[in-house]
Image (tube, rainbow, N blue to C red):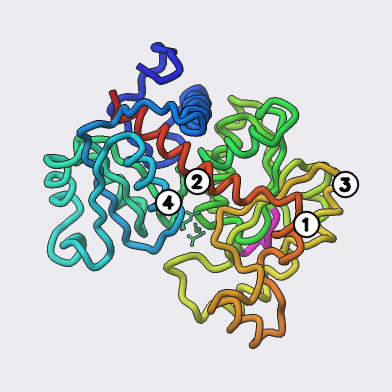
Amino acid sequence: MSINGDSTMDLHGRSLLKEIDLSADEFRYLLDSAERLRDDKRRRAERPRLCGRNIALIFEKASTRTRSAFEVAAHDQGAHVTYLGPEESQLGYKESMKDTARVLGRMFDGIEYRGFSQAAIETLGRHAGVPVWNGLTDEWHPTQMLADMLTMRDHATKPLSAVSYCYLGDTRNNTANSLLVTGALLGLDVRLAGPEELWPSPEVRTIAHELAADSGAEITLTDDVFEAVRATDYLYTDVWLSMGEPPESWDERIDLLLPYQVNTAVMHAAANPEVKFLHCLPALHNEETEVGRQLFERRGLEALEVTDDVFESHASVVFDQAENRLHTIKALMVETAGD
Ligand code: CP
Ligand code: NVA
């Protein structure tokens, strides 16, 4: 039974390993559930639906938002969490994913996994026997998509299906793959702008085009920034070098992606006074990070994927987006592993 009373949608026991594990209706249903949970929390009227549940949080890569969202959501809903960081389990060193899955599935009611290969989480999902939630792999970032679509819906003055967004930068990283496929699933106008060397794989593009044929989504993949951003509602970017990629690649990546930086000129090129800026975070937009400082000094830059003035502008809704990680991850846990 869902919190919004719609008993026709039952996601109990389901995993979210990648976006296409959900139908468009199921995806929208999770957004509705998240919105209701957010209202309840703000009214201090939240009813715990995960009492007595134990949730495992496996993180083989760093995290601020995803880990915090899972922990706070679990606590709000009455569940307990166990954090297993890169150094804190036998996983991968002395124990296979298949064996780990069968052990954790005996103890936990749900498992979050952030790691490298999608194949690893698919194995976990196949053998755990409890819901498994993808907190980011090299290929996909589906819990981010729930927050992103809720944020777009929150700030839009039209139905979500009429929204357009343009992602600029490394168009074949996890966030970009997920934005492409999610927009295609939900029937949005999705544009990706980046150099051809960094376009999504043929497999990901095929998934998106097949979904678009059903949903009516419009898909644009181009290296032309100004064509891509025209008349769009949201501009979105992500870090130019993702976790797990070699730091030696920074220079080459900066050379490739500097033309795709989100700056004031690019925001103006959207020709939409209401255009908003999104970023999954963390963002390299000023010198207040170690990585940013080193790169900016070496390359004589003041920002990487987004300039500080855009990041700090009224058009930027990145902190609403970050907060929505909590409400959407909570909805996912409640609907798949709750009462
Ligand atoms: N956006 C996101 O996944 O942030 P974290 O890496 O901090 O979890
Ligand atoms: N593409 C980024 C997303 C971080 C949330 C990464 O994988 O590092």
Q: Amino acid at mark 1?
A: Val
Q: CA distance from mark 3 to mark 4?
A: 33 Å
Residue farthest bottom in this picture = 298
Q: Read off the residue under disc 2.
A: 144
Q: Could you classify mark 3 by the number of other residues whose Cα lies within 10 Å: few (under 14), some (14-19), or many (20 or more)?
A: some
Tell me where residue 145 appears, x and y as whole percent: 52, 42
4 vs 2, front mark? 4
Tell me where residue 146 appears, x and y as whole percent: 51, 38
Earlier residue among tags 1 and 2: 2
3 vs 1, front mark? 3
Which segment did they paint magenta?
193-197
Magenta region includes residue 194: yes
Q: Read off the residue under disc 4.
A: 66
Q: Is residue 114 above or below residue 125?
A: below
1 vs 4, front mark? 4
Tell me where residue 114 appears, x and y as whole percent: 35, 54
Please tell me in which quadrant of the rendered image residue 209 appears: top right
Q: Amino acid at mark 4?
A: Thr
Q: CA distance from mark 3 to mark 2?
A: 27 Å
Q: Amino acid at mark 3?
A: Ala
Earlier residue among tags 3 and 1: 1
Please tell me in which quadrant of the rendered image residue 184 appears: top right
Q: Is residue 221 above or below residue 93?
A: above
Residue 157 relative to residue 45: left or right: right
Earlier residue among tags 3 and 4: 4
Determine whether label 3 and label 4 are within 8 Å by CB: no
Q: Is residue 329 above or below residue 248?
A: above
Determine whether label 1 and label 4 are within 8 Å by CB: no
Q: Read off the residue under disc 3.
A: 271
Q: Read off the residue under disc 1.
A: 225
